[in-house]
Amino acid sequence: MKLYDMTIAPSPRRVRIFLAEKKLEVETIQVDLMAGEQHTDSFKKLNPWCTVPVLELDDGSTISEISACCRYIEETHPEPALMGTTAKEKAHIAMWDLHMESDGYQAAADTFRNTSKGFENRAATGPEPHAQIPELAERGKKQLNSFFNFLDSRLKDHEYICGKHFSIADITAFVTIDFAKWSKIVPETALSNLKRWQDQIAARESMKA
Amino acid sequence: MKLYDMTIAPSPRRVRIFLAEKKLEVETIQVDLMAGEQHTDSFKKLNPWCTVPVLELDDGSTISEISACCRYIEETHPEPALMGTTAKEKAHIAMWDLHMESDGYQAAADTFRNTSKGFENRAATGPEPHAQIPELAERGKKQLNSFFNFLDSRLKDHEYICGKHFSIADITAFVTIDFAKWSKIVPETALSNLKRWQDQIAARESMKA
């Protein structure tokens, strides 16, 4: 198994953290996103959607999209479980992770990609150009602040996003907060539950991945 | 198990089709989205994100978000498998379904919610108001047309979205095409592979759900 990666990008980082939690080491291949390597014909053969992360399996087939990569890793290396063990846990974690993605991570991406000079005409991922929409960045900022408040409230009575156990949803939420910093958006210091959780997650060895 | 539903809405329909493929009949409870019932305190206790579908399990706990609901159903009723059986299949189907969601269904939602009068100030789902962004609707239309072309190309050499077997990705893609019609966006008639697949999917009993 190989991981097509870009060290500073938040999306492949989520898979690297997932792998580190499983104590797995895999070969990584850097893709130069700033130089547009994801739009080359050779990369499109690995992933027609022109994004990292991409997992290349030992049979040469490829899996893109963060949670699909994590699904493969979870199914082949179930311990420690990061996506649940019972049907109810699996659904519960899937629900929370989807919200960390749509309410947090997507908002951070909308904010950054619709304002950064480097993403002019590349405001959405994928093979086709899309112009930046400043109102979408504004909406993203508003959503991120709501997201931080929501997390703080959730973490008041829960050690982790999904309850008593660390899961993929914690990875998504933690990387979202780092990604939001790229747009200079940070949680207010009054959000003490969020701060407690952030410190706890930051102390995990996997977060260095 | 109960399903909080709204018959005409595309999101709960995806779970109804999934249930029908599994030959499962569950009690459904209609939620009047047009009257704002999803924003009431009693509904927020079931789903703080104010959306349908919501599955209420027999122990009273609830699962929202389409693919989390489907995850629960798949894990408790594995046959026929709609989300894969091997690790590789599960990841492959997850990848395709994520793209049907992000490249198709989300584009249809962006187009409809950012233009329809009924969604003024409700352009994004969730508890908070968000103004419509006309440029986001325009981007959605462009993405939908690319999506239809992409599907046509994919379906030239594949019977179903993920290959030889019907899966959750076919449900997401099929409902996306119906959802796009709400904004009067339909695939060009020249897309004959897409048409072949659409006719084939439409003939399934589950699609009446």
Image: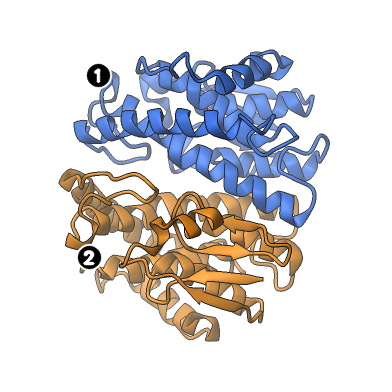
Chain colours: A blue, B orange
x%, y% of residue A133?
21, 35
Point 21% across, 34% down: residue: A135
Quarter of the image where one finds residue B61 = bottom right
Badge 2 amino acid: Ser
- Residue found farthest to the right: A79
Point 44% across, 74% down: residue: B197
Secondary structure under the numbered disc 2 in the rendered image: loop
Badge 1 amino acid: Lys
In the drawing, does residue A141 fall left or right of residue A70?
left
In depth, the one of B142 and B164 nearer the eye is: B142
Chain label for disc 1: A
Point 80% across, 38% down: residue: A77
Point 26% across, 36% down: residue: A136
- Residue found farthest to the front: B41
Q: In this rendering, which labeled residue sits more in front, label 1 or label 2?
A: 2
x%, y% of residue A201?
66, 20
x%, y% of residue B52?
47, 62
Q: Evaluate if marks 1 and 2 touch, with contact meaning CB atoms under 8 Å apart.
A: no
Q: Which residue has dot 1 on it?
A: A117
Question: Relative to residue A112, is residue A205 depicted above or below?
Answer: above
Chain label for disc 2: B
Q: Is residue B130 in view?
A: yes
**Mark 1 crowdedness (10 Å alpha carbons): few <14, some 14-19, many ≥20:** few
Q: Which residue has dot 2 on it?
A: B183
